[in-house]
Image (tube, grey):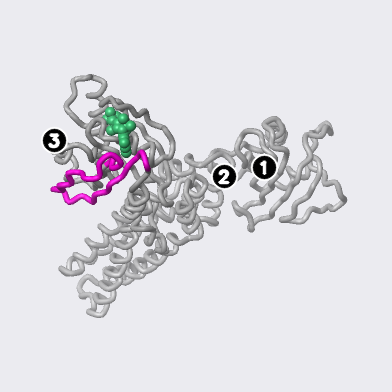
């Protein structure tokens, strides 16, 4: 599908590159053909250094058309193509106050520059070929990253770790397609055996490499978006206390009265570098209290979307029919059984029909919590070993495109094996290439571009 350009890339745009609010400095960024003339129109460096050199920072005054000083600033202009957008870029560092930034924006809008939309600078970098689409998406991920590991993954993607793989698959498949298309013109001839061999090897190798990359998506997603961990158990088992203990603060209400937690309560934290969302729930049991019943319904609904369940069991209680009920709900889910309150009694009934990993903790003394944390992070990202992989998928969009690509390649491989018409083979190869192009941006629709760039902040 042809690329449709949703934003105008011709005019010169301006936007604050720093967040709103007060601070030491703010940066206003300008990109486009008029950037330098716009700067020179109102900026006077304090020393006589004209003409200004590219990529050098100058101190001076910014004045409005009547000559009044707007602010003392540091300004740099960077001539294309060695800039973020590959256009001429100007950055003005001014004092970090709302009114200062607003005055500069007003000045340049009156001059004729257009206020940039969200992500419009990065969009230009993409349109001008400086970044491909997956690299542009990683810029947004880097800005939004909450942990060191998600920052590292985003940076690797900006550096092109994923792009290089996608380009190498694309190059191989294009080569195969050329070979297949050459023989389509001779329908009476069979594909020579050595060509069949070459095509088959290329497709099989691409399939296995793509499978390795799609296999990393689980870890990549968890490291970027965070994993959801649901605390499930009978009323009064100690779920909210465990949430508080893992968080290190008294977030959830804890009382000795069963049925204290009614609604879902979600808190983010980082466990050994892995971002997680810990969700406290109402105890799972038969209840007649309408509020508790709704809380239980919500807890049950969340079960299907969770990455890990912590089944919290009071170590001091005999197991009951209530436990059997909970077990029946958890048996097919990734679950740790966590015995709490071991400071009171250390000998729980630990019969374990589900073969769940078991942990013994006290939210009161902190015993066992370190082991539980390690087990959680190990379970979610395999002890971090997976991070050493060069490419890790973090975006659902890329994952889905690669799954489509795999489907097409498997069909291609199938038609090669049964000696089907080369037209089918060519069709599947073209589809596989189309899916790869969705990731790099070579074949992408306006909707997808809109969705990606509207998630950026203004000024990026
Ligand atoms: N000694 C001891 N008491 C605990 C521990 N964990 C929880 N408790 C106590 O057990 C009671 C229930 O704790 P909660 O954390 O509110 O239990 P819950 O599972 O969230 O209960 P509901 O929200 O009612 O379903 C409170 O009195 C807590 O102080 C623990 O590790 N040791
Ligand atoms: Mg509770």
Kindly identify which numbered label has been placed on residue 50: none
Residue 150 point in image, percent of width and height: 45, 51
* Element class at badge 1: strand
Beta carbon of the mark 1 residue lies under 8 A of ligand 2: no
For the residue carrying disc 3, how many other residues have a C-alpha within 10 Å: few (<14), some (14-19), or many (20+)? few
Q: Please provide percent x and percent y for residue 116.
A: 59, 39
**With 192 as the anchor, is 222 left or right in this view?**
right
Residue 281 appears anywhere in the view: no
Report x, y in % for residue 146.
Answer: 48, 46
* Residue interval drawn in magenta: 340-365
**Could you tell me which residue is drawn at 19 percent across and 42 percent down?**
330
Q: Nearer the viewer, mark 3 or mark 2?
A: 3
Q: Are marks 3 and 1 in contact (CB under 8 Å)?
A: no
Does residue 169 belong to the magenta stretch? no
* Chain-order first, disc 3 or disc 2: 3
Element assignment for label 3: loop
Judging by the rendered image, the residue that carries numbered circle 1 is 27
Residue closest to the eye, 102 or 428 = 102
Instruction: From the image, tell me which residue sits under label 3.
Output: 320
User: Which of the two marks, 3 or 1, is nearer to us in this view?
Assistant: 3
Q: Which of marks 1 and 2 is nearer the N terminus?
A: 1
């Amino acid at each position: 599908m042809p690329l449709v350009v949703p934003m105008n890339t011709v005019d010169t745009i301006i936007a604050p590159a720093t967040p709103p609010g007060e601070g030491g400095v703010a940066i206003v960024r300008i990109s486009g053909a008029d950037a330098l003339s716009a700067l020179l129109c109102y900026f006077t460096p304090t020393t006589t250094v004209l003409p200004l050199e590219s990529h050098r920072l100058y101190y001076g005054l910014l004045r409005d058309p009547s000559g009044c000083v707007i602010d003392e600033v540091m300004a740099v202009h960077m001539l294309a193509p060695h800039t973020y957008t590959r256009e001429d870029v100007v950055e003005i560092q001014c004092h970090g106050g709302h009114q200062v930034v607003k005055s500069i924006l007003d000045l340049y809008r009156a001059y004729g520059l257009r206020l940039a939309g969200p992500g419009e600078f990065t969009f230009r970098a993409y349109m001008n070929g400086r970044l491909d689409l997956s690299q542009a998406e990683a810029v947004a991920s880097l800005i939004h990253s909450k942990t060191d590991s998600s920052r590292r993954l985003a940076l690797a993607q900006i550096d092109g770790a994923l792009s290089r793989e996608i380009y190498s698959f694309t190059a191989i498949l294009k080569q195969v397609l050329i070979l297949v298309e050459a023989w389509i013109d001779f329908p009476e001839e069979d594909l020579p055996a050595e060509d069949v061999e070459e095509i088959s090897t290329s497709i099989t190798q691409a399939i296995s490499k793509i499978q390795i990359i799609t296999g990393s998506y689980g870890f990549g997603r968890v490291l970027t978006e965070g994993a959801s961990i649901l605390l499930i158990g009978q009323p009064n088992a100690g779920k909210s206390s465990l949430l508080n203990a893992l968080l290190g603060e008294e977030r959830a209400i804890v009382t000795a009265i069963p049925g204290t937690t009614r609604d879902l309560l979600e808190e983010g934290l980082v466990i050994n570098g892995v971002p997680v969302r810990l969700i406290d729930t109402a105890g799972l049991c038969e209840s007649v209290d309408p509020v508790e019943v709704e809380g239980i319904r919500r807890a049950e609904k969340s079960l299907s979307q969770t990455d890990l369940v912590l089944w919290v069991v009071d170590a001091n209680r005999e197991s009951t029919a209530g436990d059997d009920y909970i077990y029946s709900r958890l048996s097919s889910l990734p679950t740790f059984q966590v015995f709490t309150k071991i400071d009171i009694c250390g000998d729980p009934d630990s019969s374990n029909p589900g073969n769940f990993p078991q942990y013994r903790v006290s939210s009161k003394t902190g015993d066992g919590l370190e082991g539980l944390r390690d087990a959680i992070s190990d379970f979610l990202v395999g002890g971090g070993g997976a991070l050493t992989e060069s490419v890790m998928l973090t975006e659902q969009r890329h994952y889905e495109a690669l799954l489509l690509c795999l489907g097409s390649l498997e069909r291609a491989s199938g038609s090669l094996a049964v000696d089907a018409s080369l037209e089918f083979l060519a069709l599947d190869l073209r589809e596989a290439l189309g899916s790869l192009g969705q990731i790099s941006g070579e074949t992408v629709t306006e909707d997808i571009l809109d969705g990606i760039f509207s998630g950026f902040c203004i000024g990026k």
